Amino acid sequence: MVSSETFLLIYDISLYANIACVILSLVLLKYQAKRDRLIIIYLILSVLCDLFSEMLPRVFDIKNTNYIANLWTFMEFITLTLFYSFVRELKLSRKYHIKTIFAFTIVCLIIFLQFKSVYDFVNLHKIVSALYYSTLSIYLFYQFLVNVDNNLIRTSIFWQNTGIFFYFTGNILIFLMLDYLLSEDFSFLNVGWGIHNMLTIIKTVCFATAFIINFKYRRLND
Amino acid sequence: MTEQSPPNFITILLVGTFILLLLCGAVIFFVLLYQRKVLQNKLDIQNLQTDHQKKLLITTINSQEKERTRVGQELHDSVGAMLSAIRLNMKMITQDPAIFQKSSDEITGYLDQTIETVRNISHNLYPAGLKTFGMIGVLKEYIEKVNASDQLVISLQVNGETMRLDSNTELIIYRILQELIHNAVKHSRANNIYINMDWQDAQLFIEVRDDGVGFTSNQLDPGKRGLGLYNISNRAEVINAKVNFNNADNGGACVDLQVPYQTV
């Protein structure tokens, strides 16, 4: 088995990668379009949630930070849906995205009002979110195939979608098995958490690539 | 049983996630590969179109130059020579009024020949009767001239109700037929040319057959076609017509032209 120090290291790397990516995106902010700025907001929220989850037990002695993770899943869903609503290649109307946000809010309300408390570690809305974004990113890839216009590797949307696709598809099994991982030995949770953080690193690298591509090509256009 | 299950779950998680990531990678790889192929195809088509346009331009320029050379030569050799002769006769009259009658007859003869030559040149540039008599009318006139030259015999058969097409389409069809007849005279060593025109609903089928040596395999290959046949294909393309070059059963050349038309 891999030691827990290794998993902590992976977690640290993913957190620092996120912070580095946020800094990079802010430096290159003027080259980013509206939809790319939503990814920046998403990354900032992700870093803030991670930092709060770290700080609260240490500074304020608050042990239970599950509600931050639950809140994060909700915010993640909204920011990414808003992001996809700006993706013209997807060919889905704004109304569709608004309806999706509305439906997901209802799902979350049902989960937290009827079945679980916000202080519990809930995986159901994470599963819904992961399945939704896996499907949506595959659909966007399909649209790329149908409407081939320019070299995909040189577009930021390709890298952003790739990051989202890897992250959510790779996390599906972890979210499905979360209850089991939480109920077992801490080392099992470490494995799941380690994979999750590695996927976060992949996603962050993809987003960073997208920011650099925007900088590279928009600067050329300017 | 319960003691064995925890490691199994971890294995499932690890293997399952690995497989999912592998699938993700495969999907992205496929998307990129497919996209690259499509872009390559698009590029190939674009290159082909550029090549085709280049060839078209060269053909057009060559045809124009050929025509200019021909007209220039004809003006120089016929009209120029005859005008010089007229000038000479005029000079002779001024020098010796006694030969007025003889010279004036010669001048009249030269002038008639010049008028005829100019008429021929202008007819070759644009068949004057096309607007009035239509494609069939000028074609018949052209066939009469060729038949009168005793080089070969052209038979024209028209089936169905003859229509008037827009002047551009008529001119292009006329030029195609002129080129085919010219080819038959120049290259195929034919004695007879049979032109069959069949007017059907919104389609005009034209078959031009001869009893010459036919096309060579190179001429039948669209990539290796000569300037003349390439010119015919291009002209046909302009009026959305389909053209087929074949060899007839008797060995002669056979060209089928299918022209969609709208009546005017």
Image (cartoon, coloured by chain):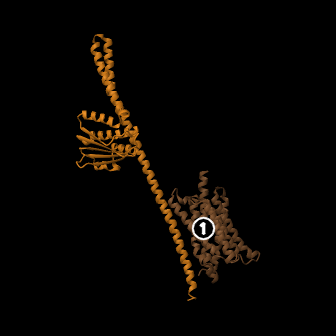
Indicate the amino acid at tag 1.
Lys
Extreme residue in the right direction: A60
**Towards the viewer: B27 or A99:** A99
Up the image or down, B93 lies above or below A117; here it is above
Q: Chain of mark 1?
A: A
Q: On the image, numbered disc 1 is attached to which residue?
A: A203
Chain letter matching colour brown: A
Residue appearing at x 60%, y 67% in the figure? A203
Res A16 seen here: no
Element type at marker 1? helix
Residue B18, image x, y percentages: 54, 74
B133 with respect to B247 (left or right): right
Q: Position of residue A120 (x, y in %)?
A: 69, 78
Q: Which chain is orange?
A: B
Q: Position of residue A39 (x, y in %)?
A: 64, 63
Compare residues A143 and B216 and report the one nearer the observer.
A143
Quadrant containing the N terminus of chain B in the rendered view:
bottom right
Furthest residue to the front?
Answer: B161
Is residue A217 placed above or below B86 in the rendered structure? below
Residue for point 28% across, 12% down: B99
Say which quarter of the image contains residue A74.
bottom right
